[in-house]
């Protein structure tokens, strides 16, 4: 079966061409060995090219993993050998059967001393720096302010008797104003008020009921004074 013509002798490479090709291949292989294989496999980088190509770091990681694996294997062998030695060298103690003699001994029962339990104490109510009580007629409003520095915190608690109130917790001072919280038809509230800036911070209350409502406001904390604005 015919596939192809036999090449002529003139078409075959000469000995010089084969030698040159062999030398070029050896040089290329040597360059690849020094610049690629040695940095990536053994973290050896004599030319610095492996570091530029990121291959040296790869080789360092491989070497580190191999060292860690060898250290773990050595640690496991060290841990197993002592346990084997202890199991072999541990002496076996002889077992003796001792005679058991029943002896009856009368023991007087001990009476535990009576411990007096402390009397339960009632939880003390928190102390307040200021406390005000005001009666609001139908439709009437009032405002209480605390003089505070920026970042100061005041604790408060208020309750209305006779009906809920509308309120607006806000602050003003130095050309600034802020509204912290608003509520409608609220019977009581408590918490902390943190001043956003230097000025007056507090509450405006209004009675929208058809009857009088008594407001009780208590305050405590880091503020100068409590004053009624209206």
Image (tube, grey):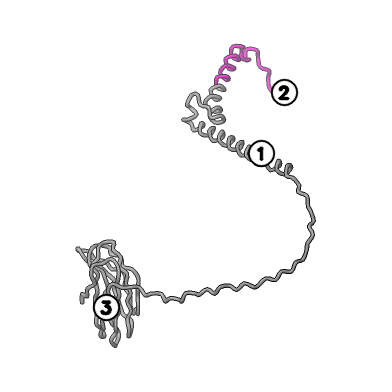
Q: How crowded is mark 1: few (under 14 residues within 10 Å), some or many (20 or more)?
A: few
Q: Where is residue 97 in the image (x, y as percent from the top left)?
A: 80, 56
Q: Which residue is drawn at 66% across and 17% down?
A: 7
Q: Main secondary structure of the magenta part?
A: helix
For the magenta stretch, what is the residue range? 4-27
Q: Position of residue 63 (x, y in %)?
A: 56, 33
3D distance between C-alphas at marks 2 and 3: 119 Å
Q: In which quarter of the image is the C terminus?
A: bottom left
For residue 151, above or below residue 116: above
Q: Residue at x 59, y 35 (%)?
A: 66
For label 2, the residue is 2
Q: Position of residue 217 (x, y in %)?
A: 29, 77
Q: Is residue 27 toward the left or the right of residue 145 in the image? A: right
For residue 112, above or below residue 39: below
Q: Residue 215, located in which quarter of the rendered image?
A: bottom left
Q: How crowded is mark 3: few (under 14 residues within 10 Å), some or many (20 or more)?
A: some
Q: What element carries label 1?
A: helix
For residue 178, above or below residue 96: below
Q: Is mark 3 on a helix, strand or loop?
A: strand
Q: What element carries label 2?
A: loop
Q: Nearer the viewer, mark 2 or mark 1?
A: 1
Q: In which quarter of the image is the N terminus?
A: top right
For label 3, the residue is 132
Q: Residues within 10 Å of mark 2 (few under 14, many from 20)?
A: few
3D distance between C-alphas at marks 3 and 1: 79 Å
Q: Which of marks 2 and 3 is in front?
A: 3
Q: Residue at x 37, y 75 (%)?
A: 125
Q: Do the residues labelled 2 and 3 touch (CB within 8 Å)?
A: no
* Upstream in sequence: badge 3 or badge 1: 1
For label 1, the residue is 77
* Upstream in sequence: badge 2 or badge 1: 2
Q: Do the residues labelled 2 and 1 touch (CB within 8 Å)?
A: no
């Amino acid at each position: 079966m015919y596939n192809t013509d036999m090449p002529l002798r003139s078409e075959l490479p000469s000995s010089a061409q084969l030698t040159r090709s062999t030398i070029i291949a050896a040089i290329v292989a040597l360059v690849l060995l020094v610049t690629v294989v040695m940095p990536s496999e053994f973290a050896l980088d004599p030319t610095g090219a492996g570091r530029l190509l990121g291959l040296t770091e790869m080789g360092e990681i491989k070497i580190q993993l191999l060292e860690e694996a060898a250290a773990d294997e050595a640690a496991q062998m060290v841990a197993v050998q002592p346990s084997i030695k202890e199991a072999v060298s541990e002496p076996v103690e002889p077992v003796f059967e001792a005679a058991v003699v029943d002896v009856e001994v009368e023991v007087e029962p001990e009476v535990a001393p009576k411990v007096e339990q402390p009397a339960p104490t009632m939880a003390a109510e928190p102390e307040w720096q200021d406390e005000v009580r005001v009666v609001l007629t139908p439709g009437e409003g009032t405002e209480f302010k605390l003089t505070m520095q920026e970042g100061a915190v005041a604790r408060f608690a208020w309750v209305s008797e006779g009906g809920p109130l509308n309120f607006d917790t806000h602050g003003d001072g130095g050309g600034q104003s802020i509204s912290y919280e608003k509520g409608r038809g609220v019977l009581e509230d408590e918490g902390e008020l943190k001043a956003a800036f230097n000025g007056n911070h507090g509450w405006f209350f209004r009675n929208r009921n058809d009857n009088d409502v008594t407001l009780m406001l208590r305050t405590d904390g880091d503020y100068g004074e409590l004053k009624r604005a209206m």
